[in-house]
Image (cartoon, rainbow, N blue to C red):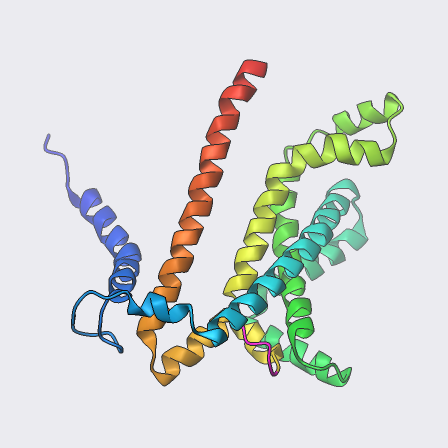
Amino acid sequence: MKRSRFPLLISVGVMLFFYLPIFLLVVGSFNDSRYGGPWRGFTLKWYERLLTERDIWAATENTLIIALVSTVVATCLGTIAAWVLHRYHGALQRTHYLFMYMPLVVPDILMGISLLLLFVNFSAKLGLTTITLAHITFCTSYVTLVVLGRLQDFDNNVVDAALDLGARWPRIIWNVILPMLGPGIASGALLAFTLSVDDFIITFFVCGPGSTTLPLYVYSSMKHGSPTIINALCTIFMAVTAIIVITGQFLMNRRQPVQQLRS
């Protein structure tokens, strides 16, 4: 029987749909045309111009500060919340689950308006602090759900055995719980960092003067007509992301043989 080529065509179509725009963006970053469009020759001037754009570096600094602080706080809060939700059960926990799921299902525009009204009612000055608090609000929920998924396979008997052997809770947390939950915590932290860097709608509502982030800067630049330099900026970020992913995969592949030898 002749094999159908329909699945192959669907796969190729999906791959083109996802990666062709990225390929065009990378190619456009080397286009000599300022506004994109027809090819006018190869150039690196847009990458050189990135080095002199102070607004871009200021926006990058704001984005990284907000993302790092939000990730650290959200990872701590989300891990503790996941452990408590998994460890203790009751009618009150259903309400806790509801509050944990709400930032995930509420539309971003509604959440942005709600947080803006909250900050205005408390006469809070809009800036990096309000953006960071807003990002912690929704990043915590994502970290909690990721760590909860990891806790589904967690063996509580290990903790009980450590208690029976006389170990105290600080040592149990450091030597037992954290190593076992490490992959889930790391995944939640990476997800929180990505969502914080990528967020636009909520940031747009709670930002203030001098607190422009990269998504806001990209939107403003595309709106007022400088897409080619934005293509260069996005290409650099994709390259950095690819290097991080490849390095992480390489380190994980190196650890697997060592773990197999130990077992």
Q: Quadrant of residue 36?
A: bottom left
- In the rendered image, the vertical position of residue 9 relative to residue 56, given as above or below: above
**Residue 7 against residue 43 in the figure, above or below:** above
Residue 102 colored magenta?
no
Front-most of residues 94 and 186: 186
Is residue 263 among what the camera can see?
no
Taking depth in this image into account, of 41 and 226 the one nearest to the observer is 41
Q: Residue furthest left?
A: 2
The magenta region covers 209-213
Q: Quadrant of the C terminus?
A: top right
Residue at point 78%, 82% (across, down)? 122
Q: How many numbered tags mark residues here? A: 0
Percent position of residue 110, x then y: 59, 76
Residue 211 magenta-highlighted: yes
Indicate left or right for 81 with 242 as reference: right
Q: What's the magenta bit mostly, secondary-structure-wise?
A: loop
Q: Whole-percent x and y of residue 209?
A: 60, 83
Residue 47 figure quarter: bottom left
Question: Residue shown at 86%/20% (left/top)?
Answer: 165
Q: Nearer the viewer, residue 213 or 4?
A: 213
Tell me where residue 66 appears, x and y as whole percent.
Answer: 62, 65
Where residue 107 appears, as percent x and y from the top left, is 55, 71
